[in-house]
Image (tube, grey):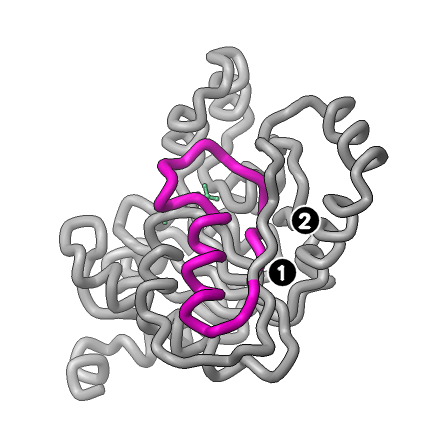
Amino acid sequence: EYIRLLRGLTSLEEEIAQKLSVKQVIIIPGDSGVDDTVQREMGRAAASLVYKHLGQNMTIAVSGGSTTAMMAEAINFTEPTTTVVPARGGLGERVEYQANTIAAVIATKLGGRYRLLHVKDAISEEVLEFILAGDAAILELSNIIKHADILVHGIGQAAKMAASRGLDESVVAEIAGKGAVGEALGQYCDLQGKIVYSTSSVGVRLDGLEDIGVVIAVAGGRKKAEALVAVANAGGQDILITDEAAAREVQTII
Ligand code: F6P
């Protein structure tokens, strides 16, 4: 707490929360882009927020990514009445960073249960409609995800995420051409928060957060500053957990 006051992080938290119109910002000292222990601390902060908001018989939805994986690792409490679900279908990450895997880790730690989504992302709208129409269990799970009590999700740089997901070159170019800088929950948005491209999948999207109880975004590193601003401007975020490097850069943008 002393370090945070000394570095002015508490007032920076308030300033950014106000400017990005989120209820709360938590800033971890350091730069997770260069120091792994900072990402670990963000994970711990996310885990304690989940602890704070978790009641009985609640549903937690979680996105993929290395940052949410750190949150899963940091969970050190139980709540056996919890159901944990992935926020979206598979987005092509390595197994340990897939939303399904992270949901299972969290559920196991809580002593609760999980439900997994076995639908790939970035399938065509027609195939998606076909799946949802023909598979009642997936449709039901999709609705559970969309109404989760707590959602914890990561944020990424649009160009980096588009490239790493193996989208067609023309799509990657389209996303860049439309000025996308941030990505979360399979949707890409520009600095003003306008969604310019969506990958179709089952689960919750950035433009569907109004039905979720508490939305917690967790993302840090100086390079993610624009992405953070973009996703926050898209709306629906309640709490943002980030690091000092990203926060100071955000301050220069907004
Ligand atoms: O692919 C899932 C996802 O949550 C993306 O929506 C986000 O951009 C990314 O992971 C964040 O990953 P990381 O925390 O590893 O930077």
Give the amino acid at mark 2: Asp
Dividing the image into four quarters, tell me where ligand 1 lies.
top left
Tag of residue 12: none
**Left or right: 2 as drawn, with respect to 52:** left
Is disc 2 surrounded by few (<14), some (14 to 19) or many (20+) residues within 10 Å? some
Describe the element under mark 1 as helix, strand or loop.
loop
- Mark 1 burial class by Cα count in 10 Å: few <14, some 14-19, many 20+: many
115 over 177 or under it: above or below: below
Q: Position of residue 170 (x, y in %)?
A: 52, 12
Based on the picture, tell me whether residue 95 belongs to the magenta stretch: yes
Give the numbered dot on residue 236: 1
Residue where numbered disc 2 is placed: 207
* Residue at 58% over, 31% down: 120
In depth, the one of 167 and 175 nearer the eye is 167
The span shown in magenta is 85-113
Residue in the foreground of this view, choosing between 137 and 196: 137
